[in-house]
Amino acid sequence: GASAPAEVFEAAVAADERIEPRDWMPDAYRATLVRQMAQHAHSEIIGMQPEANWITRAPSLRRKAILMAKVQDEAGHGLYLYSAAETLGTSREELLDKLHAGRQRYSSIFNYPTLTWADVGAIGWLVDGAAITNQVPLCRCSYGPYARAMVRICKEESFHQRQGYELLLALSRGTEAQHAMAQDAVDRWWWPSLMMFGPPDSESSHSDQSMAWKIKRHSNDELRQRFVDICVPQAESLGLTLPDPDLRWNEQRGHYDFGPIDWDEFREVLRGNGPCNEERISQRRRAHEEGAWVREAAAAYAAKHREADA
Ligand code: FAQ
């Protein structure tokens, strides 16, 4: 006979099939997806700010062109994700209003300042690197529209990561001052990058349920460890060091051990007390207000064409 919708949903998740927008899903599954996808979309949009800070001061035309394209890609990622979230019945407008009202989060990482040109390299290498490590498994997320958006985003993020690595390599192999600038940027971005993966598993409130629903495929700590393991040899090839005296290969575990993360700092940033929280959100609100005429013009143009078609 006909199965109850909840059974159909559970069976699809168990069989690794995708859940699509018109399928029945538990309210809490929908709410969790909206929360995570909105946070992700907001991160992409707010994440444009730290690097955009350096567009006017890029050291060459080539670097400027690359950086502009990269920042523009982040806007595109935000838009794919807002569109994917719309399939769950939440409009982009509603999500942006919540961001501006401080009722939805964006990644902690974007509350740190970009003090030198080398920060653009460190963001590409470490922040985009962490993003890829976290997001590749999301390509297999149980919710179809999110999984498909992730495939394209991950391809672009890989390019961004290589861009950052290449930039840092050029600085590392440059003058003594350039090398020092690259090292300083890595020193400042390393620990915040590890915090991008979220709280330790023991304090992660959503992980168990999200993993049961196959939204998340790995725990926060698993992905953080994977990222550390990837970065150590890359830092060596870059000729740079990671600012952690406890970092060493553990033969038994087959992983690198690393030192304690300052979770107080993470909690403070989440509470709004990071170095740039105020600046990021007020800049975002201002950009939204200043863009009102574009939204109005686009709506007027669409209305005119609808009339002409009718
Ligand atoms: N920052 O129970 P969990 C990018 C919150 S990459 C702020 O473990 P969950 C690319 C969490 O929301 C960055 N808040 O949560 C780029 C929850 O809050 P709630 C974006 C954080 O969701 C590069 C609470 O802590 N990527 O933008 C953070 O299961 C360069 C408890 O945590 C994504 O969003 C944090 N770091 O796991 C752009 C990836 N961590 O609701 C521009 C998709 C946790 O209790 C330039 N998201 N929280 O108030 C995910 O994979 C997950 O949401 C996690 C967190 C892993 C981030």
Image (cartoon, rainbow, N blue to C red):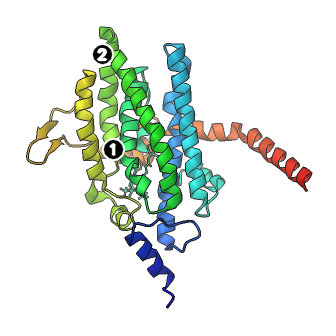
In this view, the residue farthest toward the left is 252
Q: Quadrant of residue 160?
A: top left
Q: Earlier in the sequence, mark 1 or mark 2?
A: 2
User: From the viewer's perspective, is residue 284 above or below residue 88?
Assistant: above
Q: CA distance from mark 1 to mark 2?
A: 24 Å
Q: Position of residue 280 (x, y in %)?
A: 52, 37
Judge the density around disc 2: few (<14), some (14-19), many (≥20) Cα neighbours within 10 Å: some
Element at badge 2?
helix
Element at badge 1?
helix
Question: Can you see residue 271?
Answer: yes
> Toward the viewer: 12 or 42?
12
Look at 49% across and 44% down and name the residue there: 153
Q: Is mark 1 within 8 Å of ligand 1?
A: yes
Q: In the picture provided, is 303 more to the left or to the right than 45? A: right
Q: Quadrant of residue 248?
A: top left
> Toward the viewer: 211 or 162?
162
Question: Can you see residue 53?
Answer: no
User: From the viewer's perspective, is residue 235 above or below residue 268?
Assistant: above
| Mark 1 touches mark 2? (CB < 8 Å) | no
Residue type highlighted by circle 1: Met
> Toward the viewer: 36 or 306?
306
Q: Which residue is mark 2?
A: 180
Quadrant for the C terminus in the image: bottom right
Residue type highlighted by circle 2: Ala
In this view, the residue farthest toward the top is 175
Judge the density around disc 1: few (<14), some (14-19), many (≥20) Cα neighbours within 10 Å: many
Q: Position of residue 97 (x, y in %)?
A: 62, 52
Q: Position of residue 301 (x, y in %)?
A: 83, 44
Q: Which residue is mark 1?
A: 195
Look at 51% across and 25% down and name the residue there: 67
